[in-house]
Image: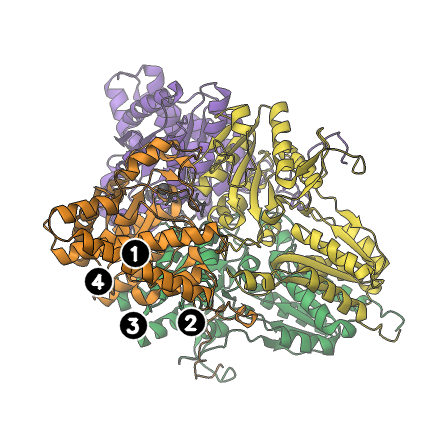
Chain colours: A yellow, B green, C purple, D orange
Amino acid sequence: MTDSPGRKLSYVQAFTEAVRLEMADDPTVICAGEDIGFFGGVFQSYAGLQTEFGVDRVVDTPISEQAIVGLGLGAAVNGMRPIVDIMFMDFMAVALDQIINQAAKIKYMFGGAATVPLTITTGGGAGMSAAAQHSQSLEALLCHIPGLKVVYPSNPLDMKGLMASCIRDDNPTVMVKHKRLLGMKAEVPEERYYTPLGEARVIRPGNDVTVVAWGKMTNDALAAADTLARDGIECEVIDPRTLQPFDIGTVVESVRRTNRAVVVHEAVRFGGLGGEIASQIQENAFDYLDAPVARLGAPFSPVPFSPDLEAAYIPSQERIVEEVRSVMARPLLGG
Amino acid sequence: MTDSPGRKLSYVQAFTEAVRLEMADDPTVICAGEDIGFFGGVFQSYAGLQTEFGVDRVVDTPISEQAIVGLGLGAAVNGMRPIVDIMFMDFMAVALDQIINQAAKIKYMFGGAATVPLTITTGGGAGMSAAAQHSQSLEALLCHIPGLKVVYPSNPLDMKGLMASCIRDDNPTVMVKHKRLLGMKAEVPEERYYTPLGEARVIRPGNDVTVVAWGKMTNDALAAADTLARDGIECEVIDPRTLQPFDIGTVVESVRRTNRAVVVHEAVRFGGLGGEIASQIQENAFDYLDAPVARLGAPFSPVPFSPDLEAAYIPSQERIVEEVRSVMARPLLGG
Amino acid sequence: MELNTDTQLDLHHTMVRIRLFEEAAGQLAEAAKLPGFLHLCVGQEAVAAGVCATLNDDDQIASNHRGHGHLVAKGGQFRPMMAELMAKSTGYCKGKGGSMHISDLSVGMLGANGIVGAGVPIAVGAAWANSLRGRGQVSVPFFGDGSTNIGAFHEAANMAAALKLPVVFVCENNEYGEFTPRDKTMAIADIVDRAAGYGMPGVIVDGMDVVAVYEAASEAVDRARRGDGPSLIEAKTFRFYNHHGIQNLGLRYRTDEEVEHWKQRDPIFTFEDQIVGAGSTTREHITEVWNHERANIADAVEFAEHSPTPTTDQLLTDVYTISSQTAEVSP
Amino acid sequence: MELNTDTQLDLHHTMVRIRLFEEAAGQLAEAAKLPGFLHLCVGQEAVAAGVCATLNDDDQIASNHRGHGHLVAKGGQFRPMMAELMAKSTGYCKGKGGSMHISDLSVGMLGANGIVGAGVPIAVGAAWANSLRGRGQVSVPFFGDGSTNIGAFHEAANMAAALKLPVVFVCENNEYGEFTPRDKTMAIADIVDRAAGYGMPGVIVDGMDVVAVYEAASEAVDRARRGDGPSLIEAKTFRFYNHHGIQNLGLRYRTDEEVEHWKQRDPIFTFEDQIVGAGSTTREHITEVWNHERANIADAVEFAEHSPTPTTDQLLTDVYTISSQTAEVSP
Ligand SMILES: Cc1ncc(C[n+]2csc(CCOP(=O)(O)OP(=O)(O)O)c2C)c(N)n1
Ligand SMILES: Cc1ncc(C[n+]2csc(CCOP(=O)(O)OP(=O)(O)O)c2C)c(N)n1
Ligand SMILES: [Mg+2]
Ligand SMILES: [Mg+2]
């Protein structure tokens, strides 16, 4: 399907289309968030939906993130499939109780009685000089919490299929849109389709080293892989797409073949999801590893405002290339 | 000093004593939180302090965790050394913005101009049948955030010295008290002392396997080590004491000697701090490892209410023993 | 309002059921037969009973940490309640939730909650769904005076008003949050002063008078059902026991006189005098009600005690809903 | 109140400084010379100017995302402000904070803030320290109408009232939060209706009238300084430009008529007519003020443009304060 010529959509348009198709199909799909109705959302993710589906189903809310998540949660328990928007991922910090203590746990606490088909959408990532409170990648906080699913697409095609799956999933899912990918264009089928949650995609095959990256980093990893290929280093680039549940099987299978791995994420390296993935790789492919699993992430500081500092802060294609090279350069012990 | 006979204090009394000594010494040390004043706190952590230092310095607050952290943060920026209490660690979710977006980042965002000698205290951990919203170990969320320090003592002696260091530290620190350790008694010197933040303690030396554990788990790891010693397996048990900054040097030095490592924490295994530590171990001791670094943590579910389920949920001495045995049992490849 | 006899007897019956459930739970806790925290609502029965009597079966409530009474009043059954408190697999939450998360969605009880104020936004969300479905259902969050100081309450109250949702906010003002009196934590005496800030009507009612509660709730529920938006009821009440557990007198943070003063106004006994005095019922009938429910409680305790504890294969179930995967293929 | 001429001229001067700073920043943003988001307060100058004129140097303010005006009014300097907006190392935050985190603790400005409502608890915390030190300092958080719907505002307002702290809450009600009008997000027209719910006095003031703002603030600041606790001022005002950037007319979410209506009430021009009419100053002097500040702005832009950008060795500094370790030995 991806090879056929066709209509191109941007990442954010693919998001909107997924929401629109589900809303058209199912009256229980409803949306709420700040500025998403009349204005279509600050990223225009919800553009046109209020016009099409009315003010009852696409609601402009007060600036009240706790109540926004609660609005979705209560409605979800009552049989709706709400989509609620938290404008920037950083703002999840003001609503975290409703996300991690309520939405994630209500089913378990009720002994299974509640079903929570809630989708929380948000914009993550740096690169817009938006400084420390509008640029974070906080997926590690969410992935640590049983009960949630976390999705972070790297391209328009996956965005549409993953967002559709989030809406139809009967669990609370968090859909992170990377702000720097909003305008990325690619062919996207017009019909509805569902990309399964929890399935990684081998986005570039290769036999020398496995590179795991998501969100904007997938694209940087692909570019780095092209550079490295010119030197004869073939990266297998894996986009997990869903971070929780995490498809470790695909990653381990690859590493057992390539014997080397680099995990790349935009989040702060310390305590980021890369640690979990690297640990699971060495647990499951210990005897196959020719080098320690490497991790690339942001250094240990808040996101700086200055574009120069920010450029140094975010893992770049160059740093991915370097990291892969240094992993490849490690001599085999006694080999 | 630890060998000399002396006065015994409980873990929570050691906490209170640290606060009392700092308050007596320095009028800028002030406290605020729910029920901490007249009542002394639900865990009696602040017992007697309002009587001794007055209602102005030991403040009973409304149930307003965001404003409680903000109260401390604003006062800290204004030159005080406030201690603010969030009763249960789970409740940090309602105040996370003030913790991770404000307190942790204000210095950086202001280009260094602000100093934030704030201490946030809280009760963490399971084992009291307190169910999903009063039992979590959420330290991984905090350790991922640059700007914070995170401390989690395993015994009264460390508690007193670490709490004193938190109060005197010029950065926002989070002091986690494990609820199941509150009554644990040990000898504690009467005088003031400061246990440096960021220094692990080798709490039991051994040459066969390194076990890293904190909070209540340190004690369980020690008990497991005793059991294993009877079979001739000598564990080196390391208590990091401070989780951020994390003293990886002590851990790596040990693993290079023992060649095997198990990280144990009470938090959910997936995405817990164990992943970071295991990753750093394999990055820094790859050629020394005879087995993958193992991690023990809670399974992927909210904390159950039922005491039976909860007992199965929390990593136990038995499971630590098993995990160490299985790490020891791994045959050396080609060795 | 002149309540008809049936309604009076129902209100009384519900209060007796709540009182007996709480007394039994308290006794079991003292005997170390209940794990975890236990927040009893003895003294506050009139609020749960009076409010829930105005609700239909398909109306919904959301509760807080002090939630047993709300569930009983909304139609919860003793057996699965007691079993839940004892952490048995026959409990409402299969022993996974306990007192602080007790719930029964089938009777419209959206759960107790361990986080102060957190049930309020959930109730508002439930109201959003209800308003879209247009069946006239009403949502009622119950919360304490102390909870009105937390952000979630504020956001949810404003949200309900902004969206004109069918919600009746019920504050049980028992003058304390845990061990701290109201006047240390707010500069107002009446929670109802907050209603105007959301643009909703607010009313103070004597929370020890079940009829007064019933009347105020009727009006607020009607208003919500009509689509005229939310309102706030502040019920002045008191918990006779400690924040958790039973102990009532000899506590440091409140005087015995204060407790005794409120106990004179026991919502059940004063109401019994009233309905007997008015000839709506007899002392004999009242005794029968108590005895009948005492037997029910004994049955529930027996049931719970003989119920199995959850087995460890239950540990990892109920974390996620396993959805049937959608049929369409991924490109 | 009859303001003396000096005060009048100071108020005017401050408003001109704010206006010119914002206009210059807006122009630079249009020319793509400023990275990141830029929230301008053109139209709202009277609030910052009127309030801050009542404050002492050691009083403190905390701001929101729309914070340049507050900083200018509290004594912030153009050069480090403009340099910060341009992400230069000579900026107030060394280029690490930018517009949304601009701050100068030395003039008592506790920072702009990127999280709606989050500065309010910080200001209350600052007031806690101030009240303990007993030097009569006052804290003033500035925030928008939309921010009063978020939990942090509510908790902080109640906290200040409960602890009777020296705080003056200043709400700039410009009728919109981003692209959504107030009436969609709350059921009240006046934010001041929330004051009673905290037990503090509240007053509405014409936010386009700098003298009215000054008078209301004087009273509230006096009250706080006396130790009589917090109060709330709601200034009705309007932002002439878009939520961020400059564009003012032709926006979908508000009518041009509405903007034009408010622009007729430009706080600077109306005040100029007033003080010239009253003989407090002359047109010539006013022109001088504008020209003088235009030169200052040009100087600041020049300074900023020629300032160095932070070097990457600055990336990891300022994350932690390196304390000198305490001397005592650990056992
Ligand atoms: C966010 C949060 N903070 C603190 C607590 C601890 N806590 C449990 S009940 C309670 C008091 C609640 O007071 P109120 O709302 O008046 O209810 P009451 O107990 O009086 O019925 C507190 C502080 C909590 N559960 N959640
Ligand atoms: C917690 C949070 N939610 C949402 C936003 C996005 N946001 C930035 S400014 C703004 C509108 C604020 O409105 P108001 O308080 O009225 O201030 P104004 O912009 O009108 O001056 C919003 C929603 C944010 N920064 N923080
Ligand atoms: Mg109460
Ligand atoms: Mg506004």
Chain letter of mark 2 equals: B
The reply to whether label 1 and label 2 mark residues of one chain is no
Total numbered badges shown on the rendered structure: 4
The reply to whether label 4 and label 3 mark residues of one chain is no
Is residue A332 positioned above or below A78 on the image?
below
Which quarter of the rendering shows the C terminus of chain A?
bottom right
Chain letter of mark 1 equals: D
Ligand 4 found in image quarter: top left
Of the two numbered discs 2 and 3 in the rendering, the one whose residue sits closer to the viewer: 2
**Disc 2 packing (10 Å; few <14; some 14–19; many ≥20):** many
Image quadrant in which you'd find residue D226: bottom left
Give the distance between the C-alpha atoms of the residues marked 2 and 3, in whole angstroms: 16 Å
Residue beneath disc 1: D17
Which quarter of the rendering shows the N terminus of chain A?
top right
Residue beneath disc 4: D56
Chain letter of mark 3 equals: B
Q: Mark 4 near ligand 2 (CB under 8 Å)?
A: no
A28 or D256: nearer the viewer: D256
Tag 2: amino acid: Asp
Task: Name the residue rendered at 48%, 81% in the picture.
Answer: D330
